[in-house]
Amino acid sequence: MLNRRQFLTLAGAAALSGQTPKKPNVLFIATDDLTTTLGCYGHPIVKTPNLDKLAKRGVLFSRAYAQFALCSPSRSSLMTGLGPDTTKIYELQTHFRSVIPDVVTMSQCFQKNGYYTARVGKIYHYGNPGQIGTDGLDDAPSWNHKVNPRGVDKDEEDKIVNLTPGRAFGSALCYYASPEPGEKHTDGLVASETIKLLEQNKDKPFFIAAGFYKPHCPYISPKKYFDMYPPQKLKTYQMIPGEMEIAPPWAYFIKEANFGITDEKAHEALQAYYAAVTFTDDNVGKLVAALDRLGLTDNTVIVFWSDHGYALGEHGQWMKQTVFEAATRIPLIFAGPGIKAKGKASPRTVEMLDFYPTLTDLCGLNQVPSNLHGRSLRPLLENPNATWDRPAISQMRRGAGAGAGQKAGNKKAAGQFVHGHSIRTERYRFTEWADGKEGEELYDYKTDPKELKNLAKSDAHTKLKEELRTRLRKITKDRGRA
Ligand SMILES: [Ca+2]
């Protein structure tokens, strides 16, 4: 935010030119199921030149976490600014308005402050790929305008190679190297439709959200991206013996390691996922280039995020629906006005709940709800190493109907659920299932970055565990945990 003197100077200059100072815009860029396999996060193979450039213009968060590693619970939480135990959204069917009808979402708060708000593609939950081209589980009051692109990939689904037959395309390791150019794919259209909105609305304060569908499965991207990643050159995750017995059974979403596929097929899945990541990077690059071309860069806050992380074989898991590091950690970059520390990374633990208070703070909005569960990241955008006492919280719910692909070993009787709550500090993660009755986990990332030693039963760590549990329960109780 500008200080008073800066504001008056700007206001004075604007008064002389006959204009009122314009509030910063927001370009809100969402991806679906993207983990931190990006150049700017140090990945040795995946090419993401556009995101690397964006990171140089802003602050990259190296320990940013999703509240819940599944689309709708995560997106409902970040858009309302309220934790999953308050929205009560733990699955993909229920709309948060049925629980909290009058909640003011983040983009609604921008509307109340005179902004034009629009989305292109997937911001709220949207069955991917099933609901592409529809409204999905949208929230109409959040937008002045919406666009639901549908690309050529929707017509190519009969050509998809499914490495995990029996699983539907929305939750399968499956791919297609398309001969069609990127511009014709749904995500190419998300980029071009968003650019149209930027061109049409560049003179008003705007909150424009571009919601990409990739790299979520089915991994359909133009063939040229597949050609960048010959499978034999890729490294798949290699498990240690007993790796799926380290944590309580509830910790694992997939019961059969790697869905039972061969290492060769895992290489193919990696190639297709990496191709989708680079395709996404290209599409993000188009948006940033358009902002520059339209002269909007200096007055537009860009937020780049994914709705949760993604496992690529760690602990035998693929995709999401765990509270392990791979599924909860997200890529997150803020760039634009008010973000002083350009090209720096912040090691502090931050959450998706922080987006709402951060953006309303950076844009100087009024009427911001007082009950938001996150905190403005402004101090870290000014000094990425600033003192920060906030851990990140993630959670999961398992049981009957807990989500697509739930395996028999994780099932409870109808209506019975096991909740997992997890706290992540810069060094440790503590997780408890059913308040500890169904097991606990404690990892020290300083000595064990791959979560291969569960210290929950270690006598030497009893005091630390108690401290983390107390902290976790205090925070989650404040956020509606029963
Ligand atoms: Ca997702």
Image (tube, grey):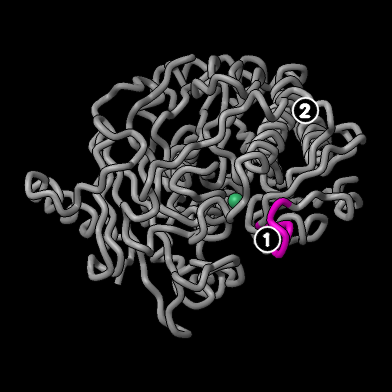
Q: Residue at x 79, y 32 (%)?
A: 195
Identify the secondary structure beneath mark 1: loop
Q: How crowded is mark 2: few (under 14 residues within 10 Å), some or many (20 or more)?
A: many
Q: Does the residue labelled 2 lie within 8 Å of ligand 1?
A: no
Q: In this view, does 324 lie above or below 437?
A: above
Asked if the beta carbon under badge 1 is closer than 8 A to the nearest atom of ligand 1, the reply is: no
Percent across and percent down for residue 268 are: 70, 38
Asked if the residue under mark 1 is in contact with the one under mark 2, i.e. CB atoms within 8 Å, the reply is: no
In the rendered structure, the answer to whether residue 54 lies left or right of residue 367 reads: right
Give the quadrant of the N terminus: top left
Establish if 285 lies above or below 98: above
Residue topped by disc 2? 225
Write the start and end of the magenta stretch as one range: 163-171
Tell me: 347 left or right of 469: right
Instruction: Compare residues 406 and 48 and report the one nearer the observer.
Output: 406
Q: Residue furthest bottom?
A: 414
- Identity of the residue drawn at 82% across and 56% down: 133
Label 2's element?
helix
Residue 168 included in the magenta stretch of the image: yes
| Residue with the mark numbered 1 | 138
Q: Residue at x 86, y 53 (%)?
A: 157
Question: What's under tag 2, amino acid-wise?
Answer: Tyr
- Position in image of residue 245 (x %, y %): 34, 55
Residue 225 at x, y = what percent?
A: 77, 28
Q: Residue 300 location, x and y as percent?
A: 61, 27
The residue sitting at 65% across, 57% down in the picture is 171
